Image: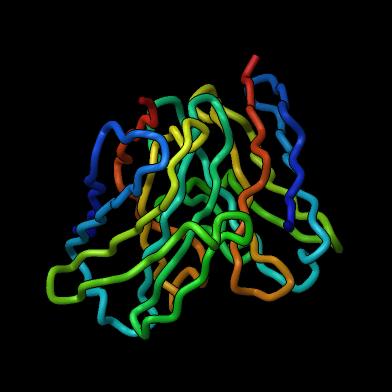
Amino acid sequence: SYELTQPPSVSVSPGQTARITCSGDALPKQYAYWYQQKPGQAPVLVIYKDSERPSGIPERFSGSSSGTTVTLTISGVQAEDEADYYCQSADSSGAVMVFGTGTKVTVL
Amino acid sequence: QVTLKESGPVLVKPTETLTLTCTVSGFSLSNARMGVSWIRQPPGKALEWLAHIFSNDEKSYSTSLKSRLTISKDTSKSQVVLTMTNMDPVDTATYYCARIDWYHYYYGMDVWGQGTTVTVSS
């Protein structure tokens, strides 16, 4: 079945930029979505349709796409951004959704 | 205010069938291009998408779990039901339901329930 691959962990100092990648063969043709999940909480949608930001999500969160890789960028990382991040997309059929393997962001 | 709430058994035995209900409020399951997804997360592990259903009754299932899952909705009760057959201890997880507002977010899930924990054990 289809898989989306993320790095297990990313470490970043406060104020620096964190970049989280997500790779999958169908990404050139399917939108990607990103979620932030803090311990004991439900996930929160932070990016949809590759690069759109829902209302209420800080501008420091941005998304981009290039070929088979999509990237979530957190600019000027704050301590409160420490969390697990998951990408989501569809397989080549467009109907079956898949989550990425998840990336733990640690703020040093 | 849009809310979703999961309900179902806390404990199920191996081989039993799990039935989970997602009760929604603040929007209607009959609204055009509104949908609900089910997602699960085993302890300490990643999110796993299970299924979704839309207002027009369009359904889709996880490729690996398709044979065990059935999703349905009761618009009059504002509920979406997921059944999973032949439960196994590896199915122990927190199960979430989440809204899909296709017109605004396409397949992004913009509002999530708090989750319900299901343990599979004899």
A38 shown above or below B98 = above
Residue at the top extreme, as displayed: A108
Residue at the left extreme, as displayed: B77
Choose top left, top right, bottom left or bottom right for residue A20. top right
Pinpoint residue B94: horizontal percent, then vertical percent. 39, 36
Pinpoint residue B61: horizontal percent, then vertical percent. 53, 65
Left or right: residue B26 compared with residue A106: left
Which of B16 and B5 lies nearest the eye of the viewer? B16
Which of B16 and A88 lies nearest the eye of the viewer? B16
Left or right: residue B84 compared with residue B67: left
Q: Which residue is drawn at 64% across and 27% down?
A: A105
Q: Residue at x 76, y 34 (%)?
A: A7
Tally the numbered discs. Answer: 0
A86 shown above or below B119 = below
Residue at the right extreme, as displayed: A67
Q: Which colour scheme is used?
A: rainbow
Pinpoint residue A66: horizontal percent, then vertical percent. 83, 61
Q: Residue at x 39, y 31 (%)?
A: B120
Pinpoint residue B119: horizontal percent, then vertical percent. 36, 30
B122 shown above or below A37 = above
Q: Which residue is drawn at 19% across and 58% down?
A: B1
Choose top left, top right, bottom left or bottom right for residue A88. bottom right
Location of the C terminus of chain B by quadrant is top left
